[in-house]
């Protein structure tokens, strides 16, 4: 993913996550039964990503992205922030696999005087394993993603239930979920050690592994034509536990959004 500053942050090309679960974008590709047989399915186009400046921040960053949805033979894929992945199982019910995911989450102390003395946190790459099962209009998904670039971002696990409603050229997907993180992640973004407290003036805050948030997902896609599609997603999250009580946290309610216009090349 290219480095894009908007205004002072380089981009997670999603994963979406947004890291978006693998099945969300895959559903549209699977629905096209009239296209000529081909090992490749390629869609891409411009988009915009909106996210908190850092976990728990009051401020928001808005920056452009290039959203891609690439599938080869139903086995290999690249989709949004999931840069390169492989399915171990991919059928009408199950999607199980792994990928490398770019996570754009970061924090810069120079951008907020309250963070002086806490140290910067850089973006990272994650190795992610996921499983998803679709039963009628309900999708159950879970994934676990580990920081593999040594940026102190630890382990993040998500569980979601999604309800899909097709309406002509529209597809609406809604559902709740939770995010759990390990102690490493919590310490990096929400913990304040005694030394950090002395440097920053923030009170010390001990943290541990646990529930970081509950969230609600909303996704909508619209088939403009045979080649053009529009998609958007909105996630509302409420921080819980040690994340909510951290002196670093300015706002428990966190919003993340993404929108893109894509062209199907094949």
Image: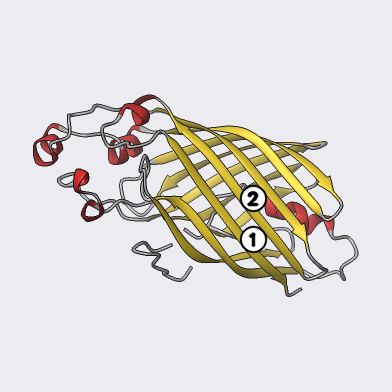
Left or right placement of residue 224 versus residue 216 in this view: right
Residue marked by disc 2: 22
Give the residue furthest to the top: 241
Give the percent coordinates (x, y) of residue 150.
Answer: 31, 51
Cβ atoms under marks 2 and 1 closer than 8 Å: yes
Q: Secondary structure at mark 2?
A: helix
Left or right placement of residue 95 versus residue 245 in this view: right
Give the residue furthest to the bottom: 265
Question: Mark number for residue 77?
Answer: 1
Q: Earlier in the sequence, mark 2 or mark 1?
A: 2
Q: Secondary structure at mark 1?
A: strand
Vertical comparison of 101 with 201: above or below: below
Rounded to the nearest whole Å, what is the CA distance between mark 2 and mark 1? 9 Å
Question: Mark number for residue 105?
Answer: none
Q: Residues within 10 Å of mark 1 (few under 14, many from 20)?
A: many
78 and 137: which is toward the camera: 137
Q: Residues within 10 Å of mark 2 (few under 14, many from 20)?
A: many
**Mark 2 or mark 1: which is in front?**
2
Left or right placement of residue 140 versus residue 224 in this view: left
What residue do we see at 28% from left, 51% from top? Answer: 121
Q: Is residue 17 visible?
A: no
Query: What sort of colour scheme is used for the picture?
Result: secondary structure
Give the percent coordinates (x, y) of residue 7.
Answer: 37, 64
Give the residue furthest to the left: 198
Quadrant in the rendering for residue 122: bottom left
């Amino acid at each position: 993913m290219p480095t894009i500053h908007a205004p002072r942050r380089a981009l997670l090309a999603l994963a979406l996550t947004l890291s978006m679960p693998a099945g969300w974008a895959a559903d549209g590709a699977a629905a096209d039964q009239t296209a000529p047989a081909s090992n490749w399915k390629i869609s891409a186009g411009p988009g915009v990503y909106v996210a908190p400046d850092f976990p728990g921040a009051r401020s928001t960053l808005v920056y452009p992205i290039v959203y891609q949805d690439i599938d080869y033979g139903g086995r290999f894929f690249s989709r949004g922030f999931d840069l390169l992945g492989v399915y171990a199982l991919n059928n009408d019910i199950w999607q199980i696999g792994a990928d490398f995911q770019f996570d754009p989450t970061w924090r810069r102390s120079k951008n907020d005087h309250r963070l002086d003395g806490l140290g910067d946190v850089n973006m990272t790459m994650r190795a992610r394993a996921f499983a998803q099962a679709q039963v009628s209009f309900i999708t159950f998904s879970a994934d676990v993603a580990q920081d593999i670039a040594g940026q102190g971002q630890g382990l993040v696990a998500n569980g979601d239930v999604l309800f899909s409603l097709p309406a002509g050229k529209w597809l609406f997907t809604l559902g709740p979920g939770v995010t759990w993180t390990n102690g490493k992640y919590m310490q990096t973004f929400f913990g304040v050690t005694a030394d950090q407290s002395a440097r920053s003036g923030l009170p010390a805050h001990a943290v541990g592994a646990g529930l970081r948030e509950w969230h609600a997902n909303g996704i909508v896609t619209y088939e403009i034509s045979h080649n053009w599609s529009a998609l958007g997603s909105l996630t509302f999250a409420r921080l819980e536990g040690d994340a909510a009580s951290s002196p670093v946290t300015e706002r428990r309610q966190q919003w993340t959004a993404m929108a893109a216009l894509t062209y199907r090349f094949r």
